[in-house]
Amino acid sequence: MEAEMPLINLSVLRDLLTEFDALTPQPDPAPDVRRRLEDVQYTVCVYTGVRDPQQAVTHARGLLGQAAAGSR
């Protein structure tokens, strides 16, 4: 039996990755920035169905890449 793909709003996922990219380069983020980054990572995990935050971000980038390739 093949695993079902969760329904994902790609626009929201794209926005989350944009925010993730904006938050990650900060070497010593303030507590509120660190908390927001954790929230974004958690949401990406939920959206992708992947528990590990880094793997979820990688998977999300792949999903967006597939969607872009499919729309050409």
Image (cartoon, rainbow, N blue to C red):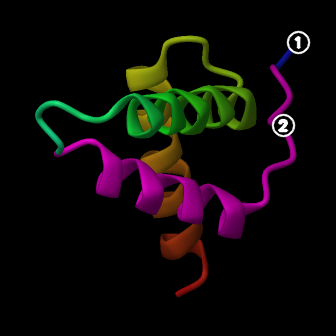
Q: Position of residue 35 (x, y in %)?
A: 50, 29
Q: In the image, residue 13 lies at what x, y percent?
A: 63, 56
Give the residues drawn in magenta, as a range: 3-25
Vertical position of residue 71 compared to residue 16: above or below: below
Q: Earlier in the sequence, mark 2 or mark 1?
A: 1
Camera-nearest residue between 23 and 71:
23
User: Which three-letter amino acid code belongs to the residue tagged 1?
Assistant: Met
Instruction: Judge whether residue 31 is colored magenta.
Output: no
Magenta span dominant secondary structure:
helix
Query: Which percent across, then down, holds residue 6?
Result: 84, 37
Query: In the figure, 19 relative to 55: above or below?
Result: below
Task: Report if residue 11 lies within the magenta region.
Answer: yes
- Left or right: residue 57 versus residue 40 is left
Give the alpha-carbon distance from disc 2 to disc 1, as whole Å. 15 Å
Q: Which mark is residue 6?
A: 2
In the picture of the structure, the residue carrying the numbered disc 1 is 1
Residue type of the residue flagged with mark 2? Pro
